[in-house]
Amino acid sequence: MAHYIVLLGPPGAGKGTQAQIISKTLNLAHVSSGDIFRENLKNQTELGKLAKGFMDRGELVPDDVTIAMIRDRLKRPDCAEGALLDGFPRTPAQAEALAEMLNEWDAKIDCVPYISVDADVLIERLSGRWSCPTCGFVYHAVYNPPKVAGICDFDGAALYQRVDDQSETVKHRIDVYMEQTSPLIDYYRKAGLLVEVDGTLPIEEVTSQLLKAINEKVG
Ligand code: AP5
């Protein structure tokens, strides 16, 4: 039976960092809506052009576009055993669409780990974030630095900082999260799927808490 796990948390909580690690441990496809948008942006597709303005302003891409994109992604062969969803759903309408999609495929969400981190920590994390344009690995200048500053450990590419990590945009992304995404915490709590993990712990400790919580829910 396919397993679907939704990682919930504010911008900079560590969803991508953790998803990179636990998708390998759980042998599940890592489906990141932000990464798919960024890949489309890099390849100058119509979807990328449409998403760019929203992303640069720190706003959400419209639900219909995002839902259709994730539906296509989840139908790919590497998601036959399920997926670890990172950054989707992000609105109540997206959550409803995901539930309908999975229902159609005789599947359901197994659990929703919520990585909680306060706003002041988020700003510090995002201002120190560096990403690899080739493999997508995410570093932090202080908390998870590459071996050589500015260079990816895995493929030697020059690291970059995201346009939407500038401080004004980060503040706006946090506001957007509070307004549009944080209602999902209660939505999934009421559904009995939410498990809260303290995202302020060191990366390895967050990973072990997440794996423990997921194993308890998935069995
Ligand atoms: P997206 O890429 O999903 O961004 P986000 O949700 O804002 O999340 P981030 O990637 O910023 O943070 P993260 O939680 O993954 O943290 P990370 O692991 O990198 O979305 C970008 C945009 O795309 C959106 O604004 C929107 O426009 C659009 N979009 C995406 N999905 C959408 C949707 N469903 N609907 C509509 N629009 C959508 O960690 C951050 C930093 O902290 C790193 O440097 C990391 O090394 C460090 N760090 C991580 N964990 C720790 C730790 N425990 N201790 C210390 N440092 C840590």
Image: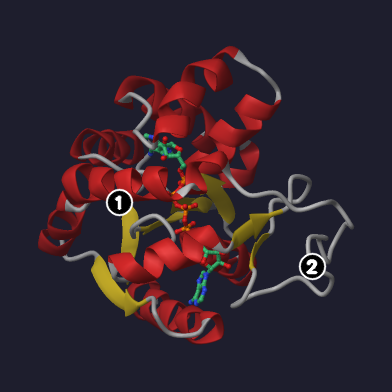
The disc label shown at residue 149, or none:
2
The disc label shown at residue 31, or none:
none
- The percent position of residue 104, horizontal first and vertical second, equals 33, 33
- The percent position of residue 194, horizontal first and vertical second, equals 24, 66
Q: Amino acid at mark 2?
A: Ala
Question: What element does badge 2 sit on?
Answer: loop
Whether residue 79 appears in this view of the structure is yes
In the rendered image, the vertical position of residue 22 relative to residue 39, given as above or below: below
Asked if residue 112 lies left or right of residue 66, the reply is: left
- The percent position of residue 80, horizontal first and vertical second, equals 56, 45
The disc label shown at residue 174, or none:
1
Q: Mark 1 and mark 2: span between their CA atoms?
A: 28 Å
Q: Earlier in the sequence, mark 1 or mark 2?
A: 2
Q: Which residue does the image show at 23% across and 64% down from the upper left?
A: 193
- The percent position of residue 23, horizontal first and vertical second, equals 58, 63
Q: Which residue does the image show at 39% across and 64% down from the upper left?
A: 122
Query: Residue reaching furthest top?
Result: 46
Asked if residue 79 lies left or right of residue 67, the reply is: right
* Camera-nearest residue between 150 and 65: 150
The quadrant of the rendering that contains the C terminus is bottom left
